[in-house]
Structures are given as C-alpha cells and as structure tokens.
C-alpha cells in the first residue's frame, strides 16, 4: 500500500483483494465538470501494474500524476510466484478481469500503465482476452490507451537475467543460471506459458493506442526487441508512440528525465481525449 504521506489530499485507499488496491480520487476529472458531462460512474480508471519490488513512495509519484487529472487508480502488484509458475499468474489475471467487469467498474473507460514485470502481469489478462474474445469484449473495448514502461520482452534467457537483477542483484549471475535450470526442468509449466504470453503481446487483442518508454542500455528490456515490436504493431495498424533514451534506468525514466517523460505522457493522454495532465511534477 502506498505511504499515506505520499497520497494526494482527497484520495482514499480501498484494499479489494490481495495485492489489489483501489485509490479513489475525490478531485473530479476535467471531463466530468460542467452540465451534461461524464458522471462519476464513467470516471476514467487507471489500471497500474508496477514493477516488482517497487517502493510505495515511487509508485505514489506516478499515481499522483493521474490523481491530478481526476483518475481513480487501481494498483495491481505483481508477484514473483506468478512468474515462476505462470498458471497462478493466469488465475490472478482472470480475477482482475472479473473485477474490471464488476458493477463498480463496468462503465469506466480504462487506461493501462504497466512497468517492467507489470507488462507480464498484463499479458496474463491479454491471454484470457484473446482466448475468450466474446466474454471479455466489453473490457477490451473500454481500454482507451496502453502505456508500457521498460517492457520486459525477449528470450527466456533475458527473462532469467531480469529475474536475477530483480531478486538478488549481487548474485544475478547465479540466479540467472538457477533460473535457466528451473525453466529447463519445468519447461511445460513455464517456458510454454511464457511463449504463449509473448505471442499474445505481439498479437495484442487490444487495439487502443500505445505509448512506450524504453532505453538502449536496459539489459532487462532489449531495445532492439522493443523496436521490432513497435514495427510489428504498426504493420497491424496500431497507433504507436515511443520515447527512447540512449542512457536511462530500468523503470526509472521519470526520475532521470521528468520533463521529457511527463511531456510525452501529457501529449499521449490528450490524444486519447480522456484527461490532460493538470500540472507537472
């Protein structure tokens, strides 16, 4: 849960289930102001999927960006066990989809902001949305935009590298070797699911515009693979915007380049006609 001192005034926190927290913002969305405009039940909702091990204060900075524009924020934290045993991740993804289809959220336009392994968590939702298009069509159509920050996408070896640097940076080489051995032994329970998740990301059932943040020196998010994904999505007719740096930090672009990050995000949000950012950090 985000540190109370980091939350904006007028925001209340509601724990909906394990690792899922709704932050309700009393500040009205710009779209909800004025007669005949959007009601509270149609207030935009941000689905935020943070990086693993993210500090509450760091996540709060991103949440605050959306609070200032009147969004409510639904934070779904990723767990390593869902990555190590993907079937659990799929179960959790299905639970999040059911939550988004509940009466509380069913009329809300959605925006997705996923960081690092949070992109993997979102991929678990996409698997279900791709498998059962009719059942989840309403959720798919409500997603107005997708934002990916430091998306972890690539080979199993790259995933193992990311796992080591995430869990035990000092022992990352050892963790990589152990992870590759684990993935080899449990290939049917892990690698086959990873390939399924990677495939559904490339053939994303959500056609909403995309904004990607990435950099060339990120060992956990291969920039060449990200650029290949961008080109593939564009060939499929998707509207893609990308912000790339030569040198930056995995899931730390906002801290390194705050004005550039916020400017790109502001422009993207305005293009979606959901709600512009009201102020800079």
Image: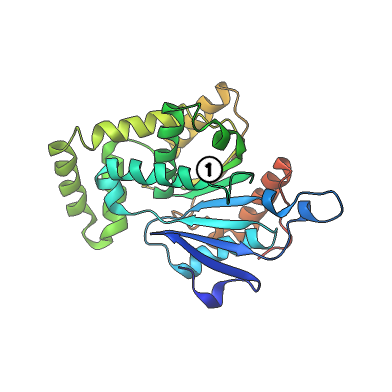
Along the line of sight, which residue is nearer the eye, 212 or 62? Answer: 62
Q: Residue at x 35, y 36 (%)?
A: 154
- Judged left or right of residue 160, residue 208 is right
Residue located farthest toward the front when viewing the structure as drawn? 103
Q: Residue at x 57, y 57 (%)?
A: 73
Along the line of sight, which residue is nearer the eye, 46 or 108? Answer: 108
| 154 w.r.t. 82: above or below | above
| 155 w.r.t. 75: above or below | above
Residue 267 position, x and y percent, is 70, 47
Q: Residue at x 34, y 30 (%)?
A: 196
Quadrant assignment, res 262 = bottom right
Q: Residue at x 55, y 37 (%)?
A: 139
- Judged left or right of residue 99, residue 170 is left
Residue 217 visible in rendering: no
| 87 w.r.t. 20: above or below | above
* Colour mapping used in the image: rainbow
The local crowd at label 1, few if under 14, some if 14 to 19, many if 20 or more residues have their Cα within 10 Å, is some
> In the picture, which quadrant includes the N terminus?
bottom left
Residue located farthest toward the right when viewing the structure as drawn? 35
Residue 191 visible in rendering: yes
Mark 1 — residue? 101
> In the picture, which quadrant includes the C terminus?
bottom right
């Amino acid at each position: 849960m985000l540190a109370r001192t980091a939350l904006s005034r007028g925001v209340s926190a509601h724990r909906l289930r394990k690792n899922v927290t709704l932050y309700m913002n009393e500040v009205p969305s710009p779209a909800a102001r004025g007669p005949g405009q959007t009601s509270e039940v149609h207030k935009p909702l941000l689905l935020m999927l943070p990086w693993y091990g993210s500090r509450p204060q760091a996540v709060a900075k991103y949440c605050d960006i959306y609070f200032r524009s009147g969004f409510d924020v639904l934070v779904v934290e990723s767990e390593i066990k869902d990555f190590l045993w993907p079937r659990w991740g799929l179960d959790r993804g299905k639970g999040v989809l059911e939550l988004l289809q509940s009466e509380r959220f069913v009329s809300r336009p959605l925006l997705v902001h996923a960081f690092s392994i949070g992109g993997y968590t979102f991929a678990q939702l996409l698997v279900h949305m791709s498998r059962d298009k009719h059942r989840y069509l309403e959720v798919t159509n409500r997603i107005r935009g997708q934002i990916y920050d430091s998306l972890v996408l690539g080979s199993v070896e790259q995933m193992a590298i990311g796992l080591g640097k995430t869990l035990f940076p000092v022992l990352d080489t050892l963790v990589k070797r152990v992870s590759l051995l684990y993935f080899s032994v449990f290939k049917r329970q892990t690698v086959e699911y990873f390939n399924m998740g990677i495939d559904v990301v490339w053939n994303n059932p959500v056609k909403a515009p995309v904004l990607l943040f990435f950099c060339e020196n990120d060992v956990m998010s291969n920039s060449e693979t990200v650029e290949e994904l961008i080109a593939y999505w564009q060939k499929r007719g998707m509207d893609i915007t990308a912000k790339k740096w030569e040198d930056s930090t995995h899931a730390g672009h906002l801290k390194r380049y705050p004005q550039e990050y916020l400017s790109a995000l502001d422009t993207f949000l305005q293009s979606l006609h959901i709600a512009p950012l009201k102020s800079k950090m």
